[in-house]
Amino acid sequence: MRSVIIILSFFVTELVCIRSKAQTPHWQRHTIDASLSGADGVRLADINRDGLQDITTGWEEGGLTKVYLHPGYHEVERPWPAVIVGETPQVEDAVFVDVNQDGYLDVISSTEGDEQMMYVSFSPANVDKLLDSSAWRMEVIPASADVHRWMFAIPAQIDGQFGIDIVAGAKNNAASIGWFQAPRNPEDLSAWAWYPVAPVTWVMSLFIRDMDRDGDLDIVTSDRKPGAVNGVKWLENPGQKLANNEDWMAHPMAGNGEEVMFMDMIDLDGDGLEDAIVTERMHQKIIFIKRLDNSGLRWKNYYIDIPEMTGRAKAVKVGDIDGDGRLDLVHTTNTEGVPGKSGVIWGAYKKEVTDNEWTWHDISGLEGYKFDRIELIDLDGDGDLDVLTCEENYGKNSEGLGVIWYENPAH
């Protein structure tokens, strides 16, 4: 009889534990760095070659760009080792790029406001000195100075020669997307040339893809402010005419006249064609932009409702969050001044990815913050996807969450 009681007691305990996990109101949050104000985006790369992804972030109000080294799975819940790689006033974005082709990843910082510069922070050619701020050397790309309010940059081999080129986008009056051409000696920043290729309103995202399968790389962007040229679109590389500095033909995909924000690209419906997914702020929707063929010219849009439980649309990222083999959405929002709203949520489709209504779950809890760009990555090595993001608060002396990650409770 005692054995039966013990067994029953064990099962009751297990059921209580399972129920407790299922009813956890939000995922556990871990802070990577909250020492400054205005963390604006997270970008990943393995900069110290240890097999773990490191982070770079620009702190807009703090006026600095920093790099964070993944400390290893056993220390990942604590603040990460960090280094300031440059003073970058009004920085909007930072990304890892091997600018000088020496085999070590540098950092490019894009700045807006009155600054309007693209900075390169050259990494020390020694991974043991990565955390030594004095070992980093920062310079301005002269061709970027006072040209645009720079918003986002991404490395790409556009012309097929010399080093890696840089595609960049801007915002506001006379803004454009274009590319910085790497010279024969890429470390000579004065020799880099800027070539605008298309007008834009406010670049939120950039992707490099061969959209028309013609062998060269095209540019995909989400362009935020409603107007004649905005929306999700791809810009066609002119190929052999690239040397003539011609405009790249724009091919619309979705969202013209709407306020599109951050986007992701992935084969969401499993048909072998890469789709796009973007948040839309004006009507509080997520747009599933389904690719219909290999030409890149035919798309069909499906709208996914953003639930009332959250704030104003910001970013979206796709991944299998609950480990059921189906792709889910993670969505961040701006909940500043909106009490009782979740800033980070994830959603699963009910029957089809084209469903208008998905089943949504809280991640962050009811925190009134302005969340930003998302990366889905297994930071703690337990086999599931965690959510890496940042909280872009304003004011040099205001307190915010900084660079953070939410631990997936699936394991």
Image (spheres, rainbow, N blue to C red):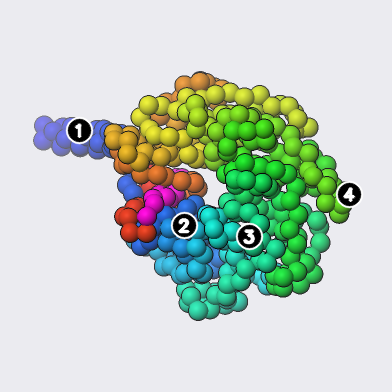
| Precedes in sequence: disc 2 or disc 3 | 2
- Image location of residue 378, percent across then percent down: 46, 50
Element carrying mark 2:
loop
Main SS class of the magenta portion in the image:
loop
**Residue count near mark 3 (Cα–Cα under 10 Å), binned few <14, some 14–19, many ≥20:** some
Q: CA distance from mark 1 to mark 4?
A: 70 Å
Quarter holding residue 154 = bottom right
User: Label 4, on which residue?
Assistant: 240
- Image location of residue 405, percent across then percent down: 40, 50
Residue 374 in the image: above or below residue 127 = above
Amino acid on which disc 1 is placed: Val
Quarter holding residue 360 = top left
Q: CA distance from mark 3 to mark 1?
A: 67 Å
Q: Nearer the viewer, mark 2 or mark 3?
A: 3
User: Label 1, on which residue?
Assistant: 12
Residue at position x 57%, y 30% from top?
Answer: 258
Q: CA distance from mark 2 to mark 1?
A: 51 Å
Q: CA distance from mark 4 to mark 2?
A: 39 Å
User: Label 3, on which residue?
Assistant: 146
Element carrying mark 3:
loop
Q: Nearer the viewer, mark 1 or mark 4?
A: 4
Q: Is residue 144 left or right of residue 110?
A: right
